[in-house]
Image (cartoon, rainbow, N blue to C red):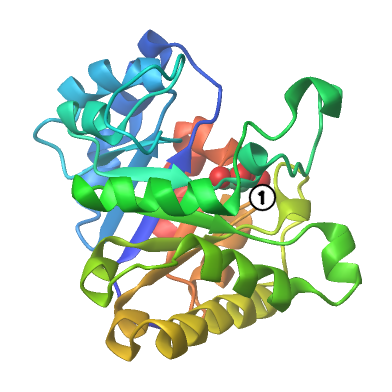
């Protein structure tokens, strides 16, 4: 087990209104605040950020966004900048989620209608740099599809995503960085990656950072696992050497489940 502070982030994706989100937070905030040795983050849709920012103003529970645009302002209809997130005391921001890369574990609408939201390795890198500029912690998602895993390409795909996403990043900026290993085939599918294998991949990510950025940064960086994390499998995942927490989707919408996962950490 590592000595890094565990981090549990709830990715609400496109769920809950602002009012519903406020009620959810109120129902688990006390429990989360009582776990002083765990960092807890909620990542609601953009529209809920102002209300949750008010509620969490004096709380140890931190606020996260689900995406960001890399410029401060301009003619980029529908986008939100790091500068605008900063105004609402957003501390974390998910970057490069597989659903934004157009790689889905579960596809509920025709693929042609969703596309890939314009997310590329290059934009992920720009977004990370923009977040560093405002002192916001990027949670960069990496992970392979089922086809890539079956073709034995898991490590190759993830190293390529890391190399592109972290291009030009300075070791001194790495204290803000969080990685999340999210195998695409485990997202929303109920298929959780075996804890030993998830730990092996997270260890591989740590080694990549040690060899390509800095050994100290690699020792300190928090690497989360995401993909069908539930109260029933959380303890096993958190009992490994290289997994420092979880990026939780579906279970983060249920206050009892989210609280149980925080307790397991
Ligand atoms: P689930 O926990 O619903 O599988 O989602 C994981 C995820 O995508 C978190 O970002």
Residue 137 rendering spot, x and y as whole percentages: 29, 52
The residue sitting at 37% across, 43% down in the picture is 93
Is 249 left or right of 109, judged from the image as shown? left
Tell me the quadrant of the picture where the N terminus can be found.
Answer: bottom left
**Residue 63 visible within the image:** yes
Asked where in the image residue 148 lies, by quadrant, the reply is bottom right
- The quadrant holding residue 210 is bottom left
Give the residue furthest to the left: 58
Question: Can residue 262 be spotted in the picture?
Answer: no
Q: Please give the name of the residue rendered at 34% of the width and 67% of the height, measured from the top-left corner.
A: 169
Q: Secondary structure at mark 1?
A: loop
Would the CB of label 1 be found within 8 Å of ligand 1?
Answer: yes
Q: Is residue 215 left or right of residue 251?
A: left
Q: Is residue 172 above or below residue 251?
A: below
Residue 53 image offset from top left, x and y in percent: 21, 25
Q: Quadrant of ligand 1?
A: top right
**Residue 139 x %, y %:** 42, 53
Where is mark 1, residue-wise? 228
């Amino acid at each position: 087990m590592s000595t890094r502070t565990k981090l549990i982030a709830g990715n609400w994706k496109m769920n809950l209104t602002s009012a519903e989100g406020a009620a959810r937070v109120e129902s688990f905030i006390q429990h989360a605040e009582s776990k002083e040795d765990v960092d807890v983050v909620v990542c609601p849709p953009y529209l809920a950020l102002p209300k949750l920012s008010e509620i969490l103003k004096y709380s140890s529970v931190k606020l996260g966004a689900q995406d960001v645009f890399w410029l401060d302002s301009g003619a980029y209809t529908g986008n939100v900048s790091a500068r605008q997130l900063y105004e609402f005391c957003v501390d974390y921001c998910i970057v490069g989620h597989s659903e934004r890369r157009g790689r889905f574990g579960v596809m509920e609408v025709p693929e042609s209608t969703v596309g890939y939201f314009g997310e590329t390795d290059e934009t992920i890198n720009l977004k990370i740099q923009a977040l560093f500029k405002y002192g916001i912690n990027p949670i960069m998602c990496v992970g392979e599809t089922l086809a890539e895993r079956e073709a034995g390409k898991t490590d190759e795909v993830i190293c390529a995503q890391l190399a592109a996403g972290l291009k030009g990043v300075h070791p001194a900026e790495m204290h803000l960085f969080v990685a999340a290993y999210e195998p695409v085939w485990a997202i929303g599918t109920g298929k959780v990656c075996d804890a030993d294998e998830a730990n092996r991949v997270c260890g591989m990510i740590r080694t990549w950072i040690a060899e390509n950025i800095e050994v100290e940064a690699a020792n300190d960086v928090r690497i989360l696992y995401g993909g069908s994390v539930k109260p029933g499998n959380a303890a096993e995942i958190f009992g490994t050497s290289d997994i420092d927490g979880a990026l939780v989707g579906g279970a983060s919408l249920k206050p009892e489940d989210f609280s149980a996962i925080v307790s397991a950490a």
